[in-house]
């Protein structure tokens, strides 16, 4: 922001000039925000409403990912989808009566069911007034051709996002965390989704065991080449009643400090294509389920500190991408 003062006789006028330094934000962030993306695409306020449709996960058969507590949003498990949606929508409507909504199928693997079940659940939510799209969280090994073709058809009549967990591009890490699929399976799933022009969001986790800062940055560089549309960056945390919690109790291993995490995220954003929407930049664990690290409960402090560090370094998303 710059101040310019003009004086003419007895009149002194100060004009405040606000200079937006980064194209893909409305609030002076230095990375491509989801708020900007929604505003630019839909020209109005849009909210995501997280839902639990009662799906399971194919990886539970082998114990699941070591950090997984069986999915966010499980407190809604016994509630009808419409009830879940209205529980969030009604209070929002009072403040933003003209807003629109994207239904976010969040908990577990939301394509892990017969196609008839998927259609019943997705179409039910799409019929709710002012729902303008779906966001479906799933796994790369739970997308057969029949499901992909249905998602393609959905994408032609509503806004559709599909979220895939990768966590790391490194095969040794995928095996260690018991991810249940390899990197090639993930690559093929992304390619099939992009062939159908579907908006793809990828989750990654910083601080996984045995990964260096350079390895975490390499995961972001790798994703640039896949043509993904959005990214969610998480910090590894240890939840109660998970294999990781058991490992941590037996042999406590170092977790990233807040300062280390912020440093890594800043470097990752420098290497991230600026066209990719940054949909999450820190984890958001439930306090009652969290074992460590304790600093992760202060979400807004972390977000503010990332902003401050990027400003201090005078960096923006994509600064270190080669122009070739």
Image (cartoon, helix red, strand yellow):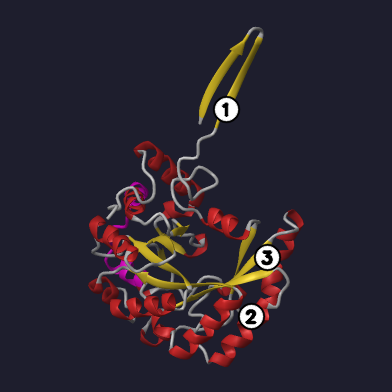
Q: Please, is residue 80 above or below residue 318 in the view? A: below
- Locate residue 172: give its quadrant: bottom left
Q: Decide which of tag 3 and tag 1 comes sooner along the chain.
A: 1
Which residues make up the magenta segment? 244-262
Image-based side of 16 in relation to 81, left or right: left
Q: Categorize mark 3 by other alpha carbons within 10 Å: few (<14), some (14-19), many (20+).
A: some
Of 209 and 152, which appears nearest the observer?
Answer: 152
Q: Categorize mark 1 by other alpha carbons within 10 Å: few (<14), some (14-19), many (20+).
A: few
Q: Residue at x 45, y 40 (%)?
A: 21
Q: Residue at x 29, y 76 (%)?
A: 183
The residue labelled by disc 1 is 16
Kind of element beneath mark 3? helix
How far across and how far down the image is residue 43, in percent?
63, 56
**Mark-to-mark CA distance, 3 and 1:** 39 Å
**Mark-to-mark CA distance, 2 and 3:** 16 Å
Q: Are marks 2 and 1 in contact (CB under 8 Å)?
A: no
Kind of element beneath mark 1? strand
The residue labelled by disc 2 is 78
């Amino acid at each position: 922001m710059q101040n310019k003062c003009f004086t003419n006789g007895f009149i002194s006028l100060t004009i405040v000039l606000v200079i937006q330094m980064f194209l893909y934000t409305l609030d002076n962030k230095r990375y491509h925000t989801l708020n900007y993306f929604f505003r630019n695409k839909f020209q109005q306020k849009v909210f995501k409403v997280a839902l639990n449709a009662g799906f399971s996960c194919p990886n539970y058969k082998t114990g699941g990912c070591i950090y997984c507590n069986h999915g966010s949003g499980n407190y809604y498990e016994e509630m009808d989808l419409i009830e879940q949606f209205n529980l969030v929508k009604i209070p929002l409507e009072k403040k933003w009566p003209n807003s629109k909504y994207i239904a976010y199928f969040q908990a577990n693997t939301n394509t892990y069911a017969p196609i008839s079940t998927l259609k019943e659940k997705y179409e039910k939510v799409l019929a709710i007034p002012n729902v303008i799209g779906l966001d479906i969280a799933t796994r790369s090994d739970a997308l057969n051709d029949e499901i992909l073709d249905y998602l393609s058809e959905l994408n032609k009549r509503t806004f559709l996002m599909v979220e895939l967990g990768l966590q790391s591009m490194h095969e040794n890490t995928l095996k260690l965390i018991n991810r249940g699929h390899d990197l090639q399976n993930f690559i093929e799933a992304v390619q099939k989704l992009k062939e159908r022009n579907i908006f793809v969001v990828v989750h990654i986790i910083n601080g996984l065991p045995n990964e260096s800062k350079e390895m975490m940055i390499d995961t972001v560089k790798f994703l640039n080449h896949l043509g993904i549309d959005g990214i969610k960056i998480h910090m590894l945390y240890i939840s109660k009643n998970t294999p990781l919690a058991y490992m941590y109790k037996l042999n406590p291993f170092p977790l990233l400090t807040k300062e280390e995490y912020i440093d890594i995220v800043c470097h990752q954003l420098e290497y991230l294509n600026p066209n990719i929407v940054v949909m999450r930049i820190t984890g958001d664990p439930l306090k009652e389920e969290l074992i460590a690290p304790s600093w992760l409960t202060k979400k807004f402090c972390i977000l503010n500190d990332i902003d401050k560090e990027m400003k201090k370094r005078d960096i923006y998303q994509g600064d270190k991408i080669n122009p070739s």
